[in-house]
Amino acid sequence: MPNDPRRRLVALLKHPHLGAGLRIALGLIVGLAFTAVLLDNIDFGHVGEILAAASLWPIVFALIAYAADFLLRAIRFWLMLREVSHHPIPLAPSISPFIASFGISDVLPLRAGDGFRVIWFNRQFGTPIGTLIGAMLVERILDLVSILILGGIALSLASGHAPPILVANFQLILMVAILAGLGVLFAPALLVRILERVKLPFAAGPIEALTAALRTTAETVERMGSWRQLLLLTCLSLACWILECMVFIGAWLSLNGDPAAFEKPFLSFAFATLGTLVPSLPGHFGSFEYFGVEAFTLAGVEASFAAAVVLLAHLILWAPTAIYGILWLLIGAQGKRAPAPRP
């Protein structure tokens, strides 16, 4: 029926400006809600005192690990594009815009850096937009599978600090999610066929969007070649996230955390990173802190100290890429354009 209110609502929600506005509003509300919970339950005066006593060298170690992490991420993305592109893409000129795209997402809502990355690589290197989107979808899946694997390991290491039933339930959820992620990586075409047979009228829109994303992923995975290439990319992804975990460990050591209790910042890192899947403020402020602190307290860490470690780690993770992205846009984005953009 043309006047069906449900259809009018769906059509309204599909309007690009309204949809973007709602997503921004949701992120603000959720991020501020998480922040309010933390402010209500943690003595941030004490947090400031803990941060004031931070040691320098563990922070330097964390920054070096973070720089290595992003260099490896840039190489991983270049390897994916090299496999699926019809013409060679030079490595060196692709590193700076790749890192800058994360900095843009750190300061602007709606992961604006992703759109920047697609446009930049399309204009500078002539890489088709569909190819770039497919590579970024594979990148996201690799990251999710890797952090879930590390989260499962962290839970196992920290199992002595949490109720066994809680650990068992989380590990079961993580295992299902890991298997689903690996299925998307190694058998996306099969998942597309399964989804095409799913008939759920109330979820037709999301299923259609998921099927389209999986089709793009399947095409990209197919063009990447053998399963050995995917295995290499998975290993690179695990290495990236282990390096990023070093940032949490560096923050923990900087604030005089027990070096022998490394499983506690490891667990907090995994949960804080998974918390970035929840809508929040730009830079993931709010959700990152909430889930990181919750994981620390689950492992028996005092709340103020937990908040100090998470805040310091988040600052190390946020500030370098945000500053780099802004400076690169102002100074370094004046490169010579390569082939004309390709659809």
Image (cartoon, rainbow, N blue to C red):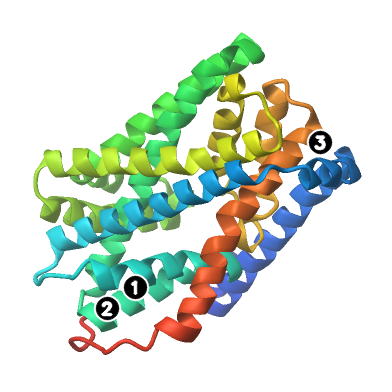
Instruction: Please provide percent x and percent y for residue 110.
Output: 54, 67
Task: Name the element at disc 3.
Answer: helix
Q: Give the labeled residue for mark 2.
A: 122
Q: Between 135 and 173, which is closer to the camera in this rendering? A: 135
Image quarter in which the C terminus is found: bottom left
* 257 over 90 or under it: above or below: above
Instruction: Please provide percent x and percent y for residue 15.
Output: 53, 76
Residue ID at (33%, 52%): 72
Q: Amino acid at mark 2?
A: Asn
Q: Amino acid at mark 1?
A: Val
In which image quadrant can residue 107 be found?
bottom right
Q: Between 121 and 135, which is closer to the camera in this rendering? A: 121
Determine the CA span between mark 2 and mark 3. Answer: 46 Å
Is there CB contact under 8 Å for labels 1 and 2? yes
Task: Name the element at disc 2.
Answer: helix
Q: Give the labeled residue for mark 1.
A: 118
Q: Between 210 and 321, which is closer to the camera in this rendering? A: 321
The circle on residue 304 is: 3
Instruction: Please provide percent x and percent y for residue 70.
Output: 40, 55
